[in-house]
Amino acid sequence: MQRVLNAVAATPLDRVKFSLAFGAAFPLFLAAEGLQRLLDHATAEADAPLRDRRSVFAEARENASIAISYALMARTTLQGFARRPRSERLL
């Protein structure tokens, strides 16, 4: 997903916006991933092996990046369909 974000030349302002959004979203995804792993560990049977996963931080970083990129794509799409003032539509 990181390739998609870097495919288009981003302006410094876009990078700042992404960094701020990532900084706000990352703790939420970190808490969600940690809670999910805690519940998986608590409900796992004693003899069943836990499945191998990447670190909590790597999973949270990837999920936060995916969520932010989808949000930015949705925002861009909605702005493309924005209604223009009547004087601009008549031209």
Image: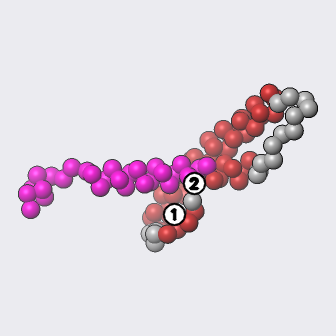
Q: Is residue 10 above or below residue 86?
A: below
The part of the image, by quadrant, that contains residue 46 is: top right
The part of the image, by quadrant, that contains residue 44 is: top right
Count the numbered circles shown.
Answer: 2
Q: What amino acid does circle 2 point to?
A: Ser
Q: In the rendered structure, which segment of residues is drawn in magenta?
A: 63-91
Q: How is the image coloured?
A: secondary structure
Among all residues in the image, which is located at the extreme bottom? Answer: 9
On-image quarter of the N terminus: bottom right
Residue appearing at x 62%, y 41% in the figure: 28
Residue 44 visible in rendering? yes
Q: Between disc 2 and disc 1, whose residue precedes?
A: 1
Q: Is residue 52 above or below residue 90?
A: above
Q: Position of residue 86 (x, y in %)?
A: 11, 52
Q: CA distance from mark 2 to mark 1?
A: 9 Å
Mark 2 burial class by Cα count in 10 Å: few <14, some 14-19, many 20+? many
Residue 22 visible in rendering? no
**Residue 55 left/right relative to 15:** right
**Helix, strand, or loop for circle 1?**
helix
Residue appearing at x 65%, y 53% in the figure: 61
Q: Which residue is mark 2?
A: 65
Q: Which residue is mark 1?
A: 5
On-image quarter of the C terminus: bottom left
Main secondary structure of the magenta stretch: helix
Q: What amino acid does circle 1 point to?
A: Leu
**Helix, strand, or loop for circle 2?**
helix
Residue appearing at x 49%, y 69% in the figure: 7
Circles 2 and 1 in contact, beta carbons < 8 Å: yes
Q: Position of residue 87 (x, y in %)?
A: 9, 56
